[in-house]
Amino acid sequence: MKRIEKYSLGMGDRFAHQGRAQLQAVVQAQKRGIQITPVWNKSNREHLIVKSEPASVRAEADAAVSSLGWSGPYHVDADHINLGNVDRFIAASDFYTIDVADYTGKPAEETEIAKFVEEAQKYKGRLFISGLAAPLEIDSSLLEGAARKFLWAMQEAGRIYRHIEALKGDDFIAEVSVDETDTPQTPAELLLILAMLAREKVPCQTIAPKFTGRFNKGVDYVGDLARFEKEFDEDLCVVRYAVQEFGLPETLKLSVHSGSDKFSLYPIIHRLLEKQGAGVHVKTAGTTWLEEVIGLAESGGEGLRIAQEIYVTAHGRFDELVKPYATVVDIDPARLPSGSEVKGWDSARYCAALRHDLSAPEYNSHFRQLLHVSFKVAAEMGDRYIEALEKHEAIIARNVTANLFDRHILPLFQ
């Protein structure tokens, strides 16, 4: 089985032009003694929107690695796949994020539920796990509730895993994503989810639970930091216990989805990883697409006009663009600048509104979130947008690398 390394960083790139700039940030980290494995990821939805193929992600990663002489491991992630779309990723990917959100809450067969509950009786009562301040309290109601909510979904994860395995052998990394559910999982529920995966013989190496609080796209965490810290710490303990108890891979670690720009969480995550000697996968660090727009705006002239046009168009198509991401954005339309206002901005004003610098008075999280979900507009520009990326590559690359290294890698891992 292919093994995931201790620290890994997901790097999304909608338009497949920033692979070298992204990897440059990892190279800089390596020079500081920080060992991180880059993972290029792109979802099926993103491929459909920009009309690309999974092979383009592999080609981008391979080209970046060759260009910079990277000799370390790297991976290409088929992000949020299911049985309906996984086949198109088989040749290009060696990391699969198995997304079972659509199956969570769908009850398994009654006989299967009863069987799992019976098998899990040994965990009833007060379960003491090393590192936890208090034992997990697991009663019959929790056991049956978890089985009804998650067992079918984990069985589906098993079906997807075995389908990939039949086509690729075991030369891939499996992640299971349960983060897109209605409520956060408790540590006890996470334990039972891992038990279900072990039962399905899914050797997952990263597990993405839903954490407390809001993980909106491209902006900082919104929620109770103390509660998150307690929850993350407990989940690390549960993962360590599950490896020993269920025979899951010793490389198993937590995955933080929508991890980009969660600046207030990075010191907490860093501290807890150090405390427990644990690894982590940050699913998508650095909003590369937004750094492209910042770079275009910063370049002035036609680049700025393209950046302005993207926003003006997005503002006029607000409902269409936001709807697919409604659960992971919080945008108040009243706090968005008008299209005519943005048309009058110079480069500095546009960049200040978009760049995620909380100390800048012009920064506008609503503006930023709308642009985050508006890459479809750039895709519709076709060659005009791609030619602008290539023309202003140096400015864009500087922004991409600095954002990933300074704002994400150093706070998380140094």
Image (cartoon, rainbow, N blue to C red):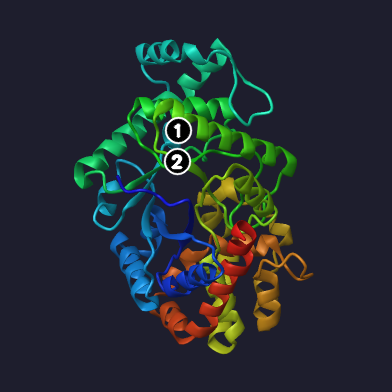
Foreground pick, 130 / 82? 130
- Residue drawn at the location 35% of the way across and 28% of the way down: 155
Residue 379 lies, in percent from the top left, at 43, 69
Foreground pick, 241 / 92? 241
Residue 59 lies, in percent from the top left, at 31, 68
Q: Quadrant of the C terminus?
A: bottom right
- Residue drawn at the location 48% of the way across and 12% of the way down: 122
- Residue drawn at the location 47% of the way across and 51% of the way down: 6
Describe residue 89's horizontal placement relative to residue 295 as left or right: left
User: What separation in Å lies between label 2 and label 1 (alpha carbons)?
Assistant: 7 Å
User: Can the viewer see residue 345 in this picture?
Assistant: no
Q: Circle 2 sits in a helix, a strand or a loop, which is it? A: loop
Circle number at residue 243: 1
Q: Do labels 2 and 1 touch, CB within 8 Å?
A: yes
Foreground pick, 130 / 220? 130
Q: Earlier in the sequence, mark 2 or mark 1?
A: 1
**Mark 1 surroundings within 10 Å by alpha-carbon count, few (fewer than 14), some (14 through 19), many (20 or more):** some
Q: Which residue is mark 2?
A: 252
**Type of amino acid at the residue the image marks with label 2:** Leu
**Mark 2 surroundings within 10 Å by alpha-carbon count, few (fewer than 14), some (14 through 19), many (20 or more):** many
Q: Quadrant of residue 47?
A: bottom left
Foreground pick, 369 / 76? 76
Q: Circle 1 sits in a helix, a strand or a loop, which is it? A: helix
Does residue 303 sit above or below 334 in this rendering? Answer: below
